[in-house]
Structure formats: structure tokens, C-alpha cells
Amino acid sequence: MIMVAITWIIVLILSTGLPVKQSLMDSMQPHRILVDSDVDTDDAITINANGWSDGGHAINHLYDILFMMDQDHIPVGVGGEGGILPNGTILPNVGGFLPIIDQGMSTAGGCRYRQAIPVGVRGHRDVNSNFGLRKSFLPQGGRKYTPLEQPTAQQVMLNAISAGPTTVFLLGAHTNFAIFLMNNPHLKKNVEHIYVMGGGIATNCLNGINSTSEQCSSIGNLYPKDSNPYAEFNIFSDPYAAYQVLHSGIPVTLIPLDATRTIPVSKDFLVEYEKRQNTYEAQYCFQSLKMLCDTWINDRFHEEYSMWDSFMVGVSLSIMRNSQSYNGENEFSEMEYMNITVVTSNEPYGVSDGSNPLIDGLAVPKFNVTKNGAHAGHAQMGMLDPFCFKIGKGKCQDGNVKEVAGPEAVRVLVATKAKPSHYSGSLLQNEFYESFLDVLNSPKQTGRFNISTQFPYYKEVVYKPDFEKKIMGKPVVYDMDMSSGDFLALLYLLKLPVELINLKGILVSPTGWATSATVDVVYDLLHMMGRDDIPVGLGDVFAVGQVHPTFPDIGECKYVKAIPQGSGGLMDSDTLYGLARDLPRSPRRYTAENTVKSGAPRDTDHPELRQPSALDVWKSIVESLDPGSKITILTNGPLTNLAKIIHSANSVSVIQEVYIVGGNIDYDINKGNVFTVPSNEHAEFNMFLDPLAAKTVFESKLNITLIPLQLQKRVGSFSAILNKLWTKNGTPESVFSGRLLSRQWQLQLRHSSYHHVDTFLGEVLGVVILGGHSHLNLTYNFKPLKIVADGDISNVGQIVIDEEQGKLVKVMESLNVAAYYDHFAVVLRDQNQSAVIGSFHEQEKIWNTPPNQNIY
Ligand SMILES: *[C@@H]1O[C@H](CO)[C@@H](O)[C@H](O)[C@H]1NC(C)=O
Ligand SMILES: *[C@@H]1O[C@H](CO)[C@@H](O)[C@H](O)[C@H]1NC(C)=O
Ligand SMILES: *[C@@H]1O[C@H](CO)[C@@H](O)[C@H](O)[C@H]1NC(C)=O
Ligand SMILES: *[C@@H]1O[C@H](CO)[C@@H](O)[C@H](O)[C@H]1NC(C)=O
Ligand SMILES: *[C@@H]1O[C@H](CO)[C@@H](O)[C@H](O)[C@H]1NC(C)=O
Ligand SMILES: *[C@@H]1O[C@H](CO)[C@@H](O)[C@H](O)[C@H]1NC(C)=O
Ligand SMILES: *[C@@H]1O[C@H](CO)[C@@H](O)[C@H](O)[C@H]1NC(C)=O
Ligand SMILES: *[C@@H]1O[C@H](CO)[C@@H](O)[C@H](O)[C@H]1NC(C)=O
């Protein structure tokens, strides 16, 4: 079994040291290098957003690393809003969020291949946050993602490659580069060589020798293997793209699993590495590797984990240094020429079964693929695709890199085996690890500082308010999915007098508009408001029913695929429209630290830091309740967490009532807002994103007040709310809210990807209603409601009025809109319960000033 957590972000850093430093070595000719996804170089980096990380987190992480390494001049590209037309015409700036065969005109789309990658632990969340080490270690500089100003992946590639002969490193999915080649065939001549980390070839297995060995039963590294035992993650993420790259006519060198399997991270290596941490980058990479080891799912880390990408970079650079001899002579790996191809679909070819968008329903296949050719078979539809599924050994081969003869074959230089160390008696066994530690610890061009040495007076301060004399108000739990409106609502909630509303805890649901690593923005906002006392619990990463039945780290994306991944979607929520980095940095943050007691394979070094789950936080709040008091819940996202609470023991009886922002009723006249699923005209996102959870809630005994879409739409005016907020004598929180809202408004005016952002404005309504204010003239009605959750994507999430089976729900009907805007602004501008530290900038000033001096 191979459970891979390719933390390509870490590897990226590991490799950061390599090219930059080695390019200083005299023997090396200057090379222009473009790296897609995971590494930094002298010339340009593009981030592949179709793999292990999400664009918004990845870009800011990369900027942090480049800042540490004093490489802020390197251009970085990510995303893009271009699409591919139904007739196969590729528009400029395709963002690469989706595999090429699934790319239409939007950045929203399915996860047929990507679902093989875990979403939370050991997957996206740990990569996006680098286990929490990114925030605890890396310094913060001035570069950051800004919507519509961030250079796209295609722009950066075009600039780099049109400037002259370039070598390309591909360390993730091939989507970006394949799109570049398909769109710019005239620039192929500028690409000298492509180095690829990926694939598994297993020559011996095909030859019949050793075909029963363990290696042959798992040529690839996906897990579980009952659908496709052949593919490796990078190639599997977009097999059609890998095919385009391999068959482009440009010389390719491949560093496959066959080679990386010969250099697992041995115990001796880790022990030696622990002793040799002379630079910041060595420290950061060591801490990352140690955390990977400590959180590895089984006891075979030292057999199963290789530093795939850094090995590939090391081998490639060594080949480039020796480029006089063209047989790939290098210090680190044995090389061999092979004739290979990439499998993009499964036989029989030409049978249109609904799985392959290149041929299904098209009179003329897309991209001119041959109707009965190798691209026209069954394309794998996920990890539970019945076509592929076979107990024992799955039968799909999408992404398989295999040796072939004949016209389909491309002659490629392939790394086969790491070379042993030339020092006799070395503990490190192979030459690459020797060099790796040397390079990482070399004092040349080293990292400048970490976050605590970036500032002379850096100090982590925990802010907790003193409410001792106050009589606390209604206990409230706030459940959010981290859409931008949810952050405004949170600010408002923190401003309501604690005598009225006592916010006991926050539950975060990563099944909606943001990915789970964004929980750090919640921590930062609480820090700004001086509320480091409020617990934050992270909910399940999958909507109810979406998790894989036997391997709970992975799952389907049936509903969440409706959220765009690029502009106006995940990339912007994950960065709070580029403003998250302006918030002060909290000492609290997501961490992969964990304990056996909470289900981890082993205790890590700091189990006390563990990120609590939503249910942990809920339980501790219930335990701390005064006798007789009950909790009011406000939900601003999908109902995943609330459904889980309902299923937990003794919960319903301690819930006073629930305010639910979401749902769309009276839909004869009112349309829903799930704009990426046109067939579903009537659903509202929060219900659509987890219909089974919504069903549980609407069938429970809870008293529900619904703030439906129709009412939210009435308070969706940017100009009205900004008029009230943008006046003199604001507070840091009103100024921040104003900046966020005016940025969204500008974006809405500038680009169609942002047409929906006023939806988030309406989400603030729930907190205001919860706060209650007589001038709002609220009216409501009771209606018998039922949620449609039958699995049909064009109906799920709709609410129907059902006199017989519906649950009687209090539905808000109207409010005084003018009073609402006024009230919202008055509360945010109130000097009471205001921010204790306004911004990161203010924090920088404090950290640059001796403790006994006034900062101003
Ligand atoms: C594809 O469709 C677009 C828009 O409908 C059109 O402009 C373009 O010429 C078409 N391309 C081909 C190759 O048919
Ligand atoms: C940052 O660097 C300093 C000096 O090397 C070190 O003492 C400190 O532990 C580092 N911070 C972290 C979070 O590792
Ligand atoms: C077959 O497998 C064994 C053990 O895994 C290995 O020692 C041997 O070199 C392999 N033979 C070939 C031809 O690869
Ligand atoms: C690869 O194909 C070429 C041309 O068909 C052939 O000359 C060569 O022997 C093949 N190499 C291998 C390793 O099969
Ligand atoms: C498809 O074939 C047509 C006609 O031969 C050609 O004009 C067009 O460029 C081809 N398109 C692609 C994407 O190869
Ligand atoms: C719901 O509200 C009604 C009326 O206010 C009350 O009688 C009932 O006990 C409440 N139900 C629960 C489960 O709290
Ligand atoms: C709101 O209610 C107050 C009295 O409670 C009334 O004077 C006022 O006209 C109402 N405003 C609206 C817009 O309905
Ligand atoms: C702010 O707090 C003070 C003291 O608690 C109180 O007297 C005052 O009314 C509050 N201001 C507002 C606008 O609520």
C-alpha cells in the first residue's frame, strides 16, 4: 500500500534551494527555466491548480517562500478565467483548474481525477497550510494575490517562453503546459527540453519477469487501487494533457516512481538531517518532513515516502550541467532510453458511454481526436467508477505511462534507479541525499529569516477580553462556510454587546465557498477583534454521503463542484479577495499536530496544539453551559455541521432555536442562485451544497427561523451599504468591511466572473436578524417546508411547500431595508468592542519597535 501525501509545496521549498544556488556554480551554463507548479527557478513559476493544492493558498505560500529566499523578482502565475469552447477553440488564459477534457467556459467543474487526492488531512488542507508550518514559520512580505491583478499561469508561461530558449520542469499535472502548447504551437521551438516528475513504468512487470512482485501489483500510487492500479498522481490528474506534452515533439526526460522508489526517506537520512539545519530553508523543510513522518498513516513512512520532486529537480539540474554528453549522464540517477506513451482512455475505443467529453454527443470530436482512436475510449469517472472497479486489481489505465512499440511510441530518457553514495561508509546510502543536505545547508544565497527573526521585537500575543463584571447575553454558536459575507457577519456578531449576544464558539464548514485551510482567516479576524478566547471547530470536508465508503480521506464532489475554483470562487474566498493578508496574524492557526486519542496514527511533537473539530467545540460548549440555559445556532453555510450535531447525543434538547441563512421558497416567481448548474433553477447554494444535511435539519425537532434567498436579495446593494459605512470616524472593522465590499463591487463591475458577489452581501442578514432590532420592522410567516434531496442534481436543494409532510418553519418575510443598512453600519462603527489591533501593518510596527517605546 502506498499512501502518498506528495506535499509538493514542501518539495517546492526543498527545491527552492537547489536551482537558485546551483545556478551559481561555475560549471553550470546559464539556463532559463520555467517550472510549472512546484519549484522556484531563476525565471518563472506557474502554479498548477489541478492537483494537491488550491490556487489561493498556493500562490500566497509561494510568495512567502520567495520572500524568505529573497527572490521576489521571480514572476509567478496562477489561474485565469479563460475557457475552452464546445468546438475545441482554446481561449487565452485558461486557468488549468480542470483536466483539459472537462474544461468548458467556467472554473467550476467535476473531480473525476482530482478526487483521488485527499481533501482534508494528508491532502489539500495539509498542503495548503503545509501542516500549519507555513503560518508558524515563514516570514510575510509585500507580495500577495490580488483579484484580476494576479498574472495568470498562461501569461507567465507566454512571457517566459517567448523570451528565448527555455527548459521546462513539470512537477504536477500537465494541464497548464499542455494548454500552452496547444495554443502556441509556434513557440514549441523555444522549449529546449522538458523534465517531468511522474508516471510509473515498471518495465520488468511487462516483460513477465518479477510480474508477481509487490511493485507490479501497484505500478501507480493512487489509493485505493481497486479502480486504477497503474496511474501516478501527476499524470492521472490530467492524462490527456500529459499525452499532449509527451507527444509534442520536444525532448522529454522522465523521473518516474520506478526511480524515486529507490530513494525512500530512510531513518538514517532523517536522523542526519535533524543534525544539519544551518539555514532557514533547511529548518523549514526539516520541520515539514518531520511532520509528514509523524502524521504518516502507517508505520512504513521510511519505505513509502520519497522526496519525489526534489529528486527530479536534482537529477535534471545535474543532467543540464553535463549537457555535453547527451545520454543523460548525471550524479544522482541511472538513466535509460525507453519508448513510451500515456494512456488517456480505456478500450473499447469509440463507444460513446457518457464518460468521455471529447466524443460524447459530438458529431465532430473535440480537438480532432480520432473517433475510434486511443483518446475515444472510456475515461475514468472517479474512484468508484463501476467500469473500472474490480476487487483485487482495478482495470482502468487512465494515466498509465507504458512502454510500447510502433508509431504511438515516444523515445524518452527515463530515470531508473538512484545512484549510491560515492563516499564509502556514508550513512546516507545514495548520492542525492548527500547533495541535498549540502545544498540546503550551504551558506550561499540562503534564506534571510523566518517570521520570528523577520522582526526584531516579534512576539506572539494572545488577546482575551475581560467580561468579568458583565452579565452575558444569549449563548450563540455561529456556523460559517467562510464565504466573504460570513466574515462580515462575524465582525457584526463580535460587535453586538456581549450582554445581548454571547458568541460561545464558531464552527467552520469546508463544504462550501472556501477550503478548510482558510480557517486561519477566522483565527486572524478573531485576533484582530481581541477574541482569541473563542473556540473554532473545523467540520467534515465532505457533504453528507460524499465520502468514499472504505477510504474516508477521499470522496466525491457532486455538489461542491458547483463552486467556481477561480475568480469569485474558492481562490477569492481562500484569500478573502486578497485582503486576508492585511489582517493581523493570530498566534492560533490550523495545525496538523494531533493525538492518538483523537484518532491520529501517533502523537506528534505538540499534540496540545491540535485543531479541534466542529463536534469537539460543540461538545465543550454544551458541557460548559449554565444549568437550564440553551444555545442558539446561526448557520450561514451548508448544514453539514448542524446535521452532525443533530445526530450526536443529547444535542437537540440544548438547542433553543436555529437561524438558517439560505433556501429559496415561492419559486414560481423567485429563481435560485446556483448559477453554475443552469438545470437547477430553484435551489439556493447553502441547501444545494449539502442537501442530505439540509434534509436532516428540516426533519428534526429544532425550531427553525429561515432567512430565505428572496429576503437576502433585498439587501444586496453595494452602494447602499457603502454609503453608510464610508463615513468619518470609522473603526478598523468598519474600514476593513468597507474595503472588502468596495473591492467586490469594483470586481463585479469589471468582470463577469464576479456577477454573483452581491449574493454574499445578503448573507449578513442572518446575524442582524439574530441581533434583533425593533426598527427593522421584521415580519414573518410559518410555512410547512420540505427539502428535495433525491440526488438529482437539477432538483436537489429546492424547498417545497408540503402541507402534509412539511415541517413548520418560521420564514422571514420582510424588513425595513433602509433601517437595515443604517443599523449594520452603526454597529460596525461603534467604538465599543472594537478591534484591539487593526491590521498586519500595525502588527509590523509593534514588532519593529522596542517594547518601551511608543510605536507612533
Ligand atoms: C468555434 O466557435 C467559435 C465561436 O462560436 C468560432 O468563433 C470559431 O471560429 C469556431 N472554431 C472552429 C474551429 O470552428
Ligand atoms: C526561527 O529562527 C530562529 C533562529 O534560527 C529559531 O530560533 C526559531 O525557532 C525559528 N522559528 C521557528 C518557528 O522555527
Ligand atoms: C526481481 O525482484 C527481485 C526482488 O524484488 C530483485 O532482486 C531482482 O533484481 C528483480 N529482477 C529483475 C530482473 O528486475
Ligand atoms: C525505440 O524505438 C526506436 C524506433 O522505433 C527503436 O530504434 C529503438 O530500438 C526503440 N528502443 C527501445 C528501447 O525499445
Ligand atoms: C482540426 O482539423 C482542422 C481541419 O483539418 C484544422 O483546421 C484544425 O486546426 C484542427 N484543430 C486542431 C485543434 O488540431
Ligand atoms: C419551539 O418553539 C415553541 C414555541 O415557542 C416551543 O413551545 C417549543 O418547545 C420549541 N421547541 C423546541 C424543541 O425548543
Ligand atoms: C416600522 O415600524 C414603525 C413602528 O413600529 C413604523 O412607524 C414605521 O413606519 C415602520 N417602517 C416601515 C418601513 O415599515
Ligand atoms: C458603549 O459602552 C458604554 C459603557 O459600557 C455604554 O455606556 C455606551 O452606551 C456604549 N455605546 C454604545 C453605542 O452602545
Image (spheres, rainbow, N blue to C red):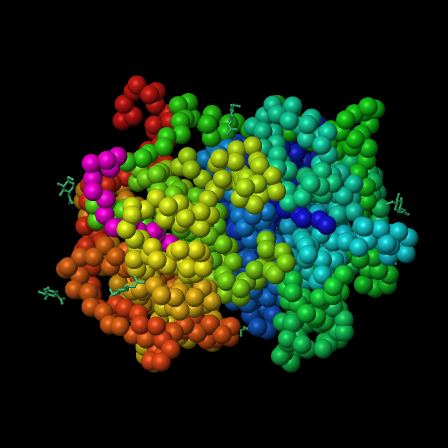
Q: Residue at x 59, y 68 (%)?
A: 89
Q: Residue at x 38, y 54 (%)?
A: 479
From the viewer's perspective, is 182 left or right of 434?
left
Along the line of sight, which residue is nearer the eye, 433 or 543? Answer: 543
Q: Residue at x 40, y 45 (%)?
A: 620
Please state the extent of the stretch shown in magenta in the rendering: 466-479
Q: Quadrant of residue 833?
A: top left
Percent x, y of residue 327: 84, 43
Q: Residue furthest front?
A: 627
Does the magenta run of residues contain 475? yes
Does 449 sit above or below residue 171?
A: above
Does the magenta run of residues contain 136? no
Along the line of sight, which residue is nearer the eye, 837 or 724? Answer: 837
Percent x, y of residue 207: 90, 56
Percent x, y of residue 553: 59, 53
Percent x, y of residue 794: 48, 75
Question: Is there any visible trace of residue 584 in the rendered image?
Answer: yes
Q: Residue at x 18, y 50 (%)?
A: 826
Does 473 sit above or below residue 569?
A: above
Does 812 sit above or below residue 184?
A: below
From the viewer's perspective, is 831 left or right of 660?
left
Question: Is there any visible trace of residue 73 in the rendered image?
Answer: no
Along the line of sight, which residue is nearer the eye, 851 or 170? Answer: 851
Where, quadrant-wise, is the C terminus in this rendering?
top left
Count how many numbered circles sit on residues in the image. Answer: 0
